[in-house]
Image (cartoon, rainbow, N blue to C red):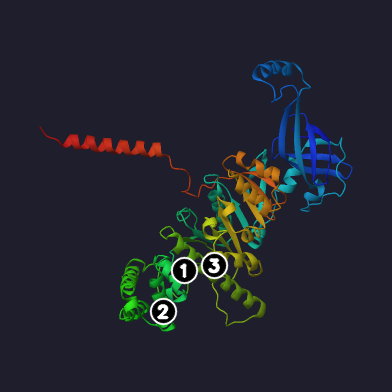
Amino acid sequence: MENELLGIVAGESFPHQVGVISTRALEVGEYVEIKSRSGALLGIVDSSAIRSRIISPEKDFETIFEAKRVSAKNPRDISYFASVRILGLVDRLALGVSQIPATPPHPGCEVFRASEESLRKIFTKQGREWVPVGSLARMNNVQVSVNINKLASRHLGILAATGSGKSNLLAHIAKKVSELNGTMVIFDYHGEYTDLSLQTKNVVPPKISPRFLDSSEFADLIDIRESADLQRDILAQCMTQHVKESDDFWKALKEEIKSKMDETKYKGSAARLLEIVERAEKKMGAILDPSFEEPLKMMKPNRINIVDMLELTERQANILLGYYLEELLEDRKRATRMTWQGNSDERYTFASPVICAVEEAHTFIPVDQHTRAKRAAAKVAREGRKFGLSLIIISQRPSRIDQDVLSQMGSMAVMKIIQPADQNYISNVSEMLSRELANYLPSLNIGESILLGQWVSIPALVKLQKVDEKLTGSDINAVEKWHEEEKRMQIAVDKTSDLIVD
């Protein structure tokens, strides 16, 4: 009910935060209006509590049981408390400006439920850059829009426990970018997006030329153990510039390795290395392609490009991801220089901005390792904004993501997070999420997300839209699958019985 009096500002008050004694238990994520001397203020409830003076936790069960009866007859016993984070003046927020008065609301200010009209002016934005992603979780009639331009220039972090809806949100973003004739590159580590039902989808097989790798990266790709020092040493000596520039890369490399077999200290290791290289040539020809000189040629502008990394090991995917991110950044730099300088000699694939999405970001941008993918992602996070290359990182373990990269995400979508370490990490890295809201993350339902940062007007607790175009990624119904298999087996048995002739 709009204009419902919810409570009174009480206790110590600050310009950005107030305490409220309320008439009922307020919901976390609920929006309220505070009638202050500076004007109507919009606030979001970031914590809520119910207290009883009679039912005290220090008492024994029998006493508590009796206290329960006394409390039920005493309407003054139960008190409702809420902490409200002030977001700004209502009329300024409607114009897209977050302005918090320097003077805090005085204790005694009345607190009302925020009206749908006010919230629509703030959250339901019009214009090509604004796209709807869902509705307010505490007011379903208010649609929430996000700014794709901010996402495409300031980066986005999607953080959530497995099964909370992060892949659904990425699919929704891909759908909207597709409708806007935009370009995305999704690095799909688990094969969740290859069957995304979009007309502009372009599935890209993972390819990389060994000519552009150093010996250590090549060793990782062909699965030479890190502890195999002699094999890696031989490979480093054999991957000469002559080999890399040879017309037949594999033949030239094998000849170099064979020449090492004449040296006593390398003989056994060189023979083993030759076997590994020959096996890689046969089994990894689709990925390690020496003729693949233009890594971006299989990607298409104004398409949702999905790099299918399902068959790659973690080390292989790491190198490929780093390589492609580097190439994408260089491509956008060339396109930008063409725009700035009019240099017709520049060759590029993408003439307009590109959004890159990295699934399993904690694997590829780890806090405690230095990898090619991490270096490339950090560079895109630092420099990409200037050249129209943005980054979306998706993870269920944010505490394992490099802090420097995560802190550069200008926007966030935070869903159900159970681990306290992950909650604290998000709060420490980002000023956008308050401690109180971070404590609420384990209570979020599937499909609910706290949207923060530059792509929304103000923080919003949102029920996200379900994307029908995403065909995989949800939990498997094992019982139903077993039942279907049982029926097929029974049909097969019945047919076999019908064929038996006495």
Toward the front, the furthest residue is 265
Q: Which residue is mark 1?
A: 298
Residue furthest toward the left? 502
Q: Residue furthest right?
A: 37
Callout 1 amino acid: Met
Identified at 86% across, 37% down, the residue is 107
For this rendering, which residue is in front, 314 or 331? 314
Identify which amino acid the numbered label 2 is placed on: Gln
* Residue 325: numbered disc: 3
Which of pointers 1 and 3 lies earlier in the amino acid sequence? 1
The residue at 48%/45% (across/down) is 474
In the rendered image, the quadrant that contains the C terminus is top left
Give the residue pinned by disc 2.
237
Q: Name which quarter of the figure residue 268 lies in.
A: bottom left
371 left or right of 215? right
What's the CA distance linking mark 1 and mark 3? 14 Å
Instruction: Find residue 423 and report its horizontal and vertical position in percent.
Output: 63, 47
Q: Is residue 413 left or right of residue 171?
A: right
Q: Amino acid at mark 3?
A: Leu
- SS at mark 1? loop
